[in-house]
Image (spheres, rainbow, N blue to C red):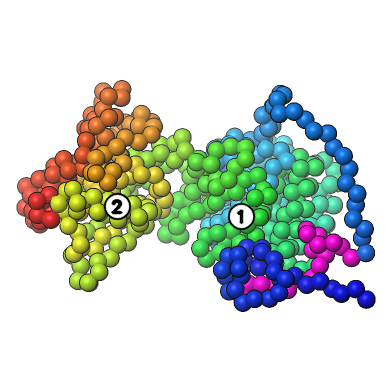
Amino acid sequence: MSKRNLTFVCQNCGAASARWVGKCEACGEWNTLVEEGDGTGIAGKMPGRTPRKGRRFALEALTGESNDAPRMPSGMSELDRVTGGGFVRGSVLLLGGDPGIGKSTLLIQAASALGKLGHRAVYISGEEAVAQVRLRAERLGLAKAPVELAAETSVEDIIATLSEGPPPRLVIIDSIQTMWTDAVEAAPGTVTQVRGSAQALIRFAKRSGAAVILVGHVTKDGQIAGPRVVEHMVDAVLSFEGEGSHQFRILRAVKNRFGPTDEIGVFEMTGLGLREVHNPSELFLSERDLGSPGTAVFAGIEGTRPVLVEIQALVAPSTLGTPRRAVVGWEGSRLSMVLAVLQAHCGINLGGHDVYLNVAGGLRIAEPGADLAAAAALVSSLANSPLPADAVYFGEVSLSGAVRPVVQSAARLKEAQKLGFARAVVPEAVRSEAADPALTLEGVGSLVSLIAEIAAKGEKRGGNGRKSGPQDG
């Protein structure tokens, strides 16, 4: 009798080990190794099956004609923006997001829009019954959309069903963690099953030309659950983000073999589902505080789209030995850098103050162009000096205190002028760029001059603006 080989697979990263250990040597997680037998269908050899002899295939030269991949518009412009112009036939997308963020709502709307264009769209749910999916469609007003539904978890049965009749153009699998395949000897939801099921669905997509969307659960730290190799196997990885307290939802492309990875799609969650937001700047600024200290409008760029958003800052005296630094929507390391520049070059010491910074609307900013707006908001709160309501700010602050230019300044200025702003506080190098005469450009060469101007206005107001002057730190 042949000895059965055992392998211990980490359920967090997919690393395999010949023996059980308490801590995974690859990712460092504890108690994640699960015993699995041979015959996984991925690396192991199936019992009683002889290995197949390989076949020869033709090799082609690097030079030659290359046609763009045929795309299929989804009927949702914001979704097409993120995917690069629509779904590529035969591609596989992995969509991740927090529970309840609206992944299923987004996909049922995309399937309905594609079905109304005459394409065959199939929605396979492994978590909900068909009646539950129908109830969601009725609530969204999509009950009459030509979408085929099924509640199934067997990958072999799904592929056999989809292979009959006309090939589908869009297949939605909700979710990949609930799928299982007979080729793998493991429990559903394990790393080996997720990897094997994804591999089978990817082969079906490449063979049939259907665009397949896999829904993936996320862990507590926001990473897509399951083996990281699945993210390498698929063609695109999309992330659906948002805050529960806000109605905005942001769709980002983390990986995209057929398009850009810096575009975002903005949606608003309503009672009738997700509504596309074609002008996110107007939505993010719809409830901003006019005339309040500590608020500045930042003109940012997300991909090719200019986005104006309000940055809110609060500086308050601290009773703690170590003051608090809280940031929402921005990098904490950049806030620490801006505070250090304010102290070293502008004479503003915030060592005895708690500092809170928030990007309104639930948007996350990663570019350094928000340094100038964040610094202006911080000093405005400390000096109790409101910034002009008709001004926007953008610019990168260097460690020497100089304000450096950022990319796509013309697009930022155009968006600000379109929304009715009259002034733009920009790096000195941007003043030479042609802009609309209705928009006044105020060049800033160093952070000291801007801080001195804000502090001076705070002193004129009286109050406690005097303590924020550049000489009082």
Residue type for callout 2: Met
Q: Give the left or right position of residue 353, taking residue 286 as reference.
A: left
Report x, y in % for residue 69: 68, 32
Q: Quarter of the image holding residue 339?
A: bottom left
The residues colored magenta run 31-47
Image point (9%, 51%), residue name? 471
Spatial separation of the CA atoms under disc 1 and disc 2: 40 Å
Image point (34%, 41%), residue name? 369
Q: Quarter of the image holding residue 112?
A: top right
> Residue 337 has which mark?
2
**Magenta stretch, overall SS:** loop
Q: Quadrant of the C terminus?
A: bottom left
> Residue 104 has which mark?
1
Q: Quarter of the image holding residue 50?
A: bottom right
Circle 2 Cα neighbour tier, 10 Å, few/some/many (<14 / 14–19 / ≥20): some
Q: Give the left or right position of residue 106, taking residue 160 as reference.
A: left
Q: Is residue 448 visible?
A: yes
Q: Give the left or right position of residue 71, taking residue 439 as reference.
A: right
Q: Is residue 297 visible?
A: no
